[in-house]
Amino acid sequence: NVNAYRTSWGNRFVTRSFLNPSNVEGTAQFNDIDVLHQGVEAELTYRPIDNLKLKGMFSAGNWRYTKDFEATLFDDNQNEIGTGTLYTKDAKVGDAAQLTSYFEADYRIAKVVSVDLGFRFVDGLYADYSIVDSDFTNPDNEGALKLPSFGLVNLGITSRFTVLGAASTFRINVNNLLNTTYIAESNTNIHAEDGSTTWNGIDVTNSVWFGFGRTWNAALTFNF
């Protein structure tokens, strides 16, 4: 199963406040903000033998702002005083991975017990920034901050049995089996420079969320 998509999100409107050279606060109003989402997705299921099922998924996208945007500038009395520019052309959209893949092997050990092992890879994940950040008023800005790629391994065990004539299932999941440390999200867009203190290439002054370490959960289901 393969799908391709291309979607343009246009006619957006954003505002940002600023201080003019006289230290007087004003407002910039940007119109017709346009974002392009395009990519391809594929899914595959294959059973090489009766008790082994393989599943895979791949998604690659290119989500970006299509151009620079002009603003009308107003003073604190809403009098028009000029224009400004956001230099966002080709800046990547943040807060959603643009390349992901997943592979899972589900093996039935016995008639009532199966084990599945999955691996998920994430890349092309950018900071959850705002295009009205001061970074983008500079034509030489570095664009969106790209976060380090990561891969996670998940394990699941399923047991099927009967209780008082009711078909029942016990399921246990171990998420992030290898206890991988990774950044799941950044709320800031601070690029590392020479002399910056970094973690995996990311300036530590950023406000980030690390993903969960190893966790587990279990579920017991009765079907009456």
Image (tube, rainbow, N blue to C red):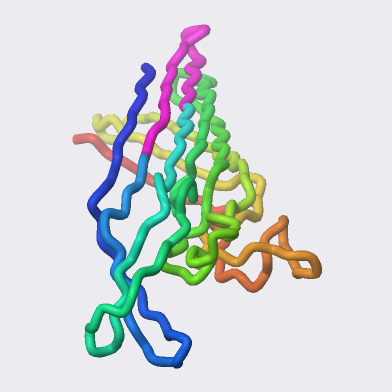
Magenta stretch: give its range.
37-57
In the image shown, does 162 or 60 lie closer to the viewer?
60
- 159 or 126: which is nearer to us? 126
Residue 88 image position (x, y, % from top left): 46, 55
Asked whether, in this view, residue 136 is left or right of residue 75, the answer is right
Provide residue 69's location: percent of width, then percent of height.
37, 57
Between 163 and 125, the one nearer to me in the picture = 125
Query: Would you say 16 lies left or right of 217 here?
Result: left
Indicate whether 74 appears above or below 118. Answer: below
Q: Main secondary structure of the magenta part?
A: strand
| Residue 77, position as x, y percentages in the image | 23, 89
Which residue is outermost to the front? 82
Name the residue at 30% across, 36% down: 7
Residue depicted at 60% across the width and 53% down the height? 147
Q: Nearer the viewer, residue 67 or 95?
A: 67
Residue 218 in picture, x, y percent from top left: 43, 47
